[in-house]
Image (cartoon, grey):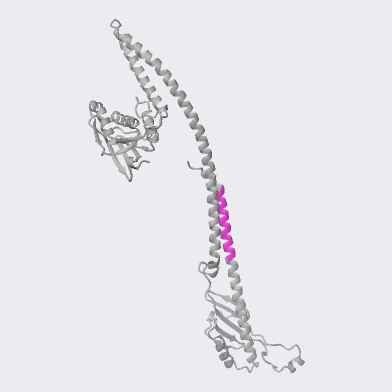
Amino acid sequence: MNPRPSNHRTPILAALVMLLSLVIWIFWSWQGYVERSMDWRRQRAQDSFATLNAVIASMSNGELTDWKQVETVLSSVIRGSRTLFVVVQGRHGRLVQTGTMPEFLMTNSTRGEMDTDDLYVMWSPLQPSHIPANWTEALASINLGLGLWPRSNPVMYLGFRSSRENFTSSWFWQRQAPIFASALVCILAVTATWIAGIRRRLLAEELSAERIRSSHLEELGLAAAGLAHETKNPLGIIMGMAQQIASRPDIPAESRTMLEHIIDEVDKASSRLGNFMNFARQRKPSLAPVRIDRLCHEVAHILGPDFEAGGVELLTQVRAATISADEAMLRQVLVNLLLNSLHASAAGTTVRIVLGRQERRLELCVEDRGRGIPAELLPNIFKPYVSGSATGHGLGLAIVKRVVEAHGWKISARSIRGQGATMTISGIKPARETP
């Protein structure tokens, strides 16, 4: 019983919406982390810039600044730090260079920043350590002129090691992955519970409808069986009277022939009514240990004359095995299957009864090389009133299927038109494995 896909559409769409929301949340959180990381790098760079700016300003003396000494001091300051290079670019050339600065970073702008996969660079004009508010304050300053340049301040470039974090190996992912995983598990659990609830509800509805339908069919079956039983009694009377009339020596030959036709038709009708009553009867099997090899040989012996008359060879390839079954019902199954194979087989062909094993179960097969089952009938061959023979009533295989399923087994049919058919009863437990 498979619920229609439309019944699961709402929980699946809800799950997709929640998953999309989770992805957006992860993306938004990652973007926030990247922006915060960038702000943190920028702040550290600005702090380093301010420190180095203060060092340069403390050693400067306008145009008389000893830049070689400044470069030596800066080299010692940045040694062992994340700062890769310090470059001070003046109006007429480079004043200080520690480390190697990529040439492509030189720019005409006096302020800016650049972030690559492995390098973060910022540049800005050097600022004086203190700018006097007026000439009186300037003349009173003990550091008159320190950090001041006549026309324009030089631009300092700072380069820092910078590695762009991979999403899956970042600190962000290491900290947030358990949270995201928990959210994903919750979404899947809610969706699975929702779908399971829908399936349980649909299953309960189907079972309730099936119980009502089964009860209705059982009532119809009982009514039909009663009708068949009541119909069979008048047929028996008609046959008896026809046989009595036919036994008189003084009736004309033409009347005797008509009476024989009546007896044949009544006999066929009685046989069909008997099959119908067997099909309508809901009888539970009475399980007992049965030697299936002996039963198969016994049925083959009983039907032997019929097979000989039809010129069909009947082979029994059944090894000794004991199963738990209703012997009378299993005998009926074998008789029906073998007679079907006999009626479908031409003279000179062979019908086989084979007992095989599939894992811990047994399989009983009846194989023939007859005309086979038409492909259009094969899917419905076990349904009532479906027959590949013009003279068949279509209840034999339906009865077989009901008996097989009452034992907890399964039956299937394989056939190729013109090459025969195989009926397989599977799922048979040996007696020692039957509870």
Total tally of numbered discs in the picture: 0
Task: Pick the residue in front: 93 or 6.
Answer: 6
Tell me if I can see residue 392 in this picture. Answer: yes
- Vertical side of 66 occupied by 228: above or below: above
Q: Position of residue 337 (x, y in %)?
A: 32, 31
Dominant secondary-structure state across the stretch colored magenta: helix
- Vertical side of 23 occupied by 247: above or below: above
Q: Position of residue 388 (x, y in %)?
A: 35, 29
- Relative side of 380 to 114, left or right: left
Magenta segment boundaries in residue numbering: 10-29
Q: Position of residue 331 (x, y in %)?
A: 32, 31
In reply to whether residue 252 is colored magenta, the answer given is: no
Q: What is the quadrant of residue 38 in the picture?
A: bottom right
Residue drawn where x is 57% and y is 85% of the image: 87
Tell me if I can see residue 419 in this picture. Answer: no
Quarter of the C terminus within the rendering = top left
Q: What is the quadrant of residue 44 in the picture?
A: bottom right
- Vertical side of 324 occupied by 79: above or below: below
Task: Pick the residue in front: 55 or 323.
Answer: 323
In reply to whether residue 28 is colored magenta, the answer given is: yes
Q: Position of residue 47 (x, y in %)?
A: 62, 81
Residue drawn where x is 55% and y is 87% of the image: 97
Task: Pick the residue in front: 307 or 124.
Answer: 307
Q: What is the quadrant of residue 397 in the picture?
A: top left
